[in-house]
Amino acid sequence: MTGAPQAADEDMRALFGPSVAVFAALRGPEHAVEEANPAFAATIGDAPATLRSELDEVYRTGEPRTAHDVRIGELSFDFTCEPRRDAEGAVTGVRVIGVDTTQVRQAQWLMAEHRALLEQIARQAPLAEVLDGMARCIEQLAPEEVLVSVLLADADGRHLHHGAAPSLPAFYNEAIDGIATGDGVGSCGTAAHRREPVIVTDIAADPLWADFRDLAGRAGLAACWSTPILGRDGGLLGTFAMYHRAPRVPQESDLALARVFAGTAALAIERAEEARPAAAAAVVAPLALAAITMLPTIALRSARLPRQPLPRTAEDLSQVPGRLDLERATRQVARARQLLSGLLAGCQAVIAVGVLVLAADQSLWSRLLAGVLALLALLRGRLFREREQVAAAVLSVTLMLLAGAGILVVRFTGHPVVLVGVLAPALAVIALLAAVIGGLTGRRRATPRLARGLDVLETTLMLGVVPLALAVWDVYRTLMDLRA
């Protein structure tokens, strides 16, 4: 477990490496360079024009001054300017000490953007939105022009499909959508196949791009570095690629940047995949709950005997049976009861699975919907009077409560012992009481006041099902984004 955090720390150190310090001793009011360290000569070379006013002020007043975020070419510096004095204390020049803060500024911006991406993932923003924002973030961060592409692997990991590529030409994205994984299938197909980064510094000369060289030429692409996106279990989720307009060899900071954002993409993809079962459960479980209401009607219809046609002649009248076939009616009612019990058990099973899926989801709305559905499933047991039907309802709800609460306890505490030692006995007592109440309900009806109270409770909970299901589907946030 320590390997991944250590690797992440190394990537961050590569991205936010040590800053370069520059030093120069300037002479006279013209600020001629009298002495300078190699870093000053390499990055600046002469007295910075952007510091002219500060240098003049220090030389005139003899007071030190500082300047922050001074742009010199593509670099940013923080400067301290101090007076140089002779033996009599007269100002003879200015001493300049500067620190290259380019990486620091980029680090601050990168951390802010990375935090925003993680917040998007946490609030279950659509995967396409997260990946597109990540691609644009890197394209803005890179000091040289870079075009980012994210491809998503299908279920069997044999093909890659378009995920995000805001700056690549549309014809290029369409051409590589659905490419197979394997050696020689460009940088991304090869990286997906090998499960390791593939660095192509010159597409025109690399054999991995033999089948896509003309396509890359039309798109103006000359280099491609691809990193596989792997899940927690090591499975292939996709690829993260950085394209360049000219042949280019990556620096360690470039590779570290790719690894960091490939990990972020993996988190977003896995979170999106985890949300799919919850979204499906938010639809299927309420439908199964609604179906329970119709089960008594279905059973009643199946218990009816076929209606005999009305006699039209004297001969028809003579053939009408004189009494009801009680044995046949009894068999019909028994079959209806079996049908009702089977349908009820099936609906309860669907609801139970849906509740467990929703309880396991990380969304608060999913967990609230799981609790509401479990309570409604218990209340719906009032529709039935047969002992086995009531037992099926109570048992399924008890299992929902036990498993759902267990999922929440383990997720929040990480200690299954709490579930076994405390929660399970408490819920077992609740289940026993529910079974006793269910057995009594099977023999006699509730009092009118209790029945009305249960009806009001059930109606209130039912009114909350659709809004909660829409929240699980993230409909409200989507509507707010459309208004914005």
Image (spheres, rainbow, N blue to C red):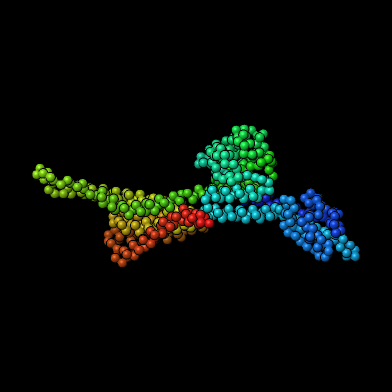
Residue 47 found in image quarter = bottom right
Q: What percent of the width, then of the height, locates residue 429?
A: 39, 61
Can residue 197 be seen at all in this image of the molecule?
A: no
- The residue at 45%/53% (across/down) is 358
Q: What percent of the width, then of the height, locates residue 229?
A: 58, 44
In the rendered image, the vertical position of residue 300 relative to residue 446, given as above or below: above
Q: What percent of the width, then of the height, locates residue 26?
A: 84, 56
- The residue at 21%/46% (across/down) is 306
- The residue at 56%/50% (across/down) is 130
Return the residue nearer the eye: 171 or 440.
171
Can residue 422 be seen at all in this image of the molecule?
A: yes
Tally the marks: 0
Residue 74 horizontal side relative to residue 332, left or right: right
Residue 77 horizontal side relative to residue 216, left or right: right
Return the residue nearer the eye: 27 or 371.
27
Residue 452 horizontal side relative to residue 365, left or right: left
In the rendered image, the vertical position of residue 328 relative to residue 450, given as above or below: above
In the rendered image, the vertical position of residue 201 relative to residue 267, given as above or below: above
Q: What percent of the width, then of the height, locates residue 120?
A: 55, 54
Residue sitting farthest toward the bottom:
449
Return the residue nearer the eye: 147 or 384.
147
- The residue at 43%/52% (across/down) is 282
